[in-house]
Image: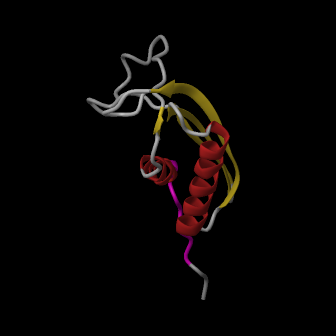
Amino acid sequence: MATPEVEISKNVLMDIAATTLDGIEGTEVATTPLKVGEVLRTQTPGRKPRALKVTREGQDVTVDVGLNIEFGRNLTGTAEKVQQAVRENIELMTGLRVRAVNVTVQNVCVPKGGQA
């Protein structure tokens, strides 16, 4: 008897990464500026395009993320925490192998509800 195959869509991988990132204190996924022509594409109303990209080649996944990190946090330590959390969650939930989680710190921002 053949084992049925399960296909995991790219949107599911994006949602896992985004949900993981939302749970890491002191960080948020940066928004990305719209390129010419993207304004007219159908996008989810009220959602800004985020600097989050997932690439899948067979069983291997690569995640690229641009982050805003709160002022006063250790940038390297926070980026490493993000890499580990995203890798663990995608691998645990999907069984796929995460080749890399590439983090770019795009902005340092004032903590929400506080001052730097």
Q: Nearer the viewer, residue 10 or 68?
A: 68
Vertical side of 21 occupied by 72: above or below: above
Q: Please tell me whether residue 5 belongs to the stretch shown in magenta.
A: yes
Q: Residue at x 58, y 48 (%)?
A: 82
Q: Residue at x 57, y 56 (%)?
A: 85
Q: Where's the N terminus, which quadrant?
A: bottom right
Q: Residue at x 34, y 27 (%)?
A: 42
Residue farthest to the top, as pictured: 36
Q: Nearer the viewer, residue 74 or 82?
A: 74
Vertical side of 63 occupied by 107: above or below: above
- In this rendering, the count of numbered labels is 0
Vertical side of 42 occupied by 86: above or below: below
Q: Nearer the viewer, residue 96 or 82?
A: 82
Residue 76 appears at what percent x and percent y?
67, 40
Range drawn in magenta: 4-10
- Left or right: 37 as drawn, with respect to 72: left
Q: Where's the C terminus, which quadrant?
A: top left
Residue 47 appears at what percent x and percent y?
32, 31
- Left or right: 92 as drawn, with respect to 12: right
- Left or right: 45 as drawn, with respect to 57: left
Residue 96 appears at what percent x and percent y?
64, 63
Q: Residue at x 57, y 26 (%)?
A: 106
Residue 80 appears at what percent x and percent y?
66, 48
- Left or right: 39 as drawn, with respect to 3: left
Residue farthest to the left, as pictured: 45
Secondary structure mostly seen in the magenta stretch = loop
Q: Please tell me whether residue 65 belongs to the stretch shown in magenta.
A: no
